[in-house]
Amino acid sequence: MELKKSASANTENQRVPILLTGMLFVGSLVLASFSYTAGVEKTDSKKGDTKVADNQYVVETQQKQKDETPPPPQVDAPPPPAEEIVEKVNTEKEPEPAVPVPPPVQTGPIDQPKIQGEIIDFPDVEATFPGGAAEMQKWINANVQYPQTAIEMNEQGRVYLSFVVEPDGSITNVEVERGVSPDLDREAKRVVRKMPKWTSGEAAGKSVRTRCRLPIIFTLE
């Protein structure tokens, strides 16, 4: 007896292939949906980058336009008016001609006395004042003039002088060896220069130049 399969039995045998086919179709749809989403995101990101680039380009273009803006034209200001030159009338008087100076008178050299011979400090015979030391003291007391400034300053003391008695008895080379004050020193030198001629000193029987030393005493009473 021949066995026959029913139509329901044939349908059950085809269920597995149909299920596999449906799962494959669903997987394809899911994969396609993921691919589309990734493509959209990439497109959006590219659009965003394009927008940022466009914004930067616009900003740079505006900045360049500002930099390239030409400066405002400069107007040359008129120069300041020149000061008026006022001519003044010359009222100055002409200088009077100078008086011509006569040429200097040509004069010959002044002959100065030539004093020859060495100065002897210790001659054979000392030079002396006429009449001796007592007369010399009287003469000094009679001729000395006490300076008023020295009196006010209460200046007093001894002024030590040195001088040379020439062979003719005249006095030269008066110097202060030790003084008291400028006023008293000056007065002492004046008194010695005013002295009359001395008796000259002698060496080897001849009149010679002799150095003498003398103190002038200034005392306030």
Image (cartoon, helix red, strand yellow):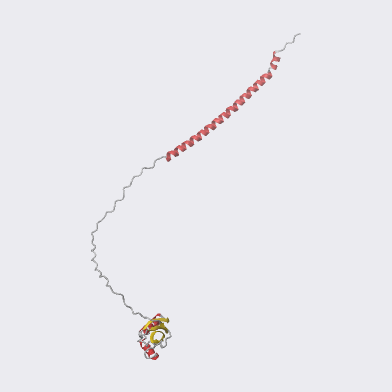
Residue at 56% x, 29% y: name it.
40
* Residue situated in front as seen by the camera: 151 or 206: 206
Q: Is residue 40 visible?
A: yes
- Quarter placement of the C terminus: bottom left
Residue 57, image x, y percentages: 47, 36
The answer to whether 43 appears left or right of 1 in the picture is left
Examine the rendered structure and indicate whether residue 90 appears above or below residue 66. Answer: below
Examine the rendered structure and indicate whether residue 158 appears above or below residue 106. Answer: below
Examine the rendered structure and indicate whether residue 66 appears above or below residue 107. Answer: above
The answer to whether 178 appears left or right of 100 in the picture is right
Examine the rendered structure and indicate whether residue 106 appears above or below residue 193. Answer: above
Residue at 70% x, 17% y: name it.
13
Q: Is residue 155 visible?
A: no
Question: Which corner quadrant of the image does residue 27 belong to?
Answer: top right
Residue at 50% x, 34% y: name it.
51
Residue 62, image x, y percentages: 44, 38
Residue 204, image x, y percentages: 41, 87
* Residue situated in front as seen by the camera: 147 or 68: 147
Question: Which corner quadrant of the image does residue 112 belong to?
Answer: bottom left
Residue 74, image x, y percentages: 35, 44
In this view, the residue farthest toward the top is 1
Count of numbered tags: 0
In this view, the residue farthest toward the right is 1
- Quarter placement of the N terminus: top right
In this view, the residue farthest toward the front is 204
Residue at 65% x, 21% y: name it.
22
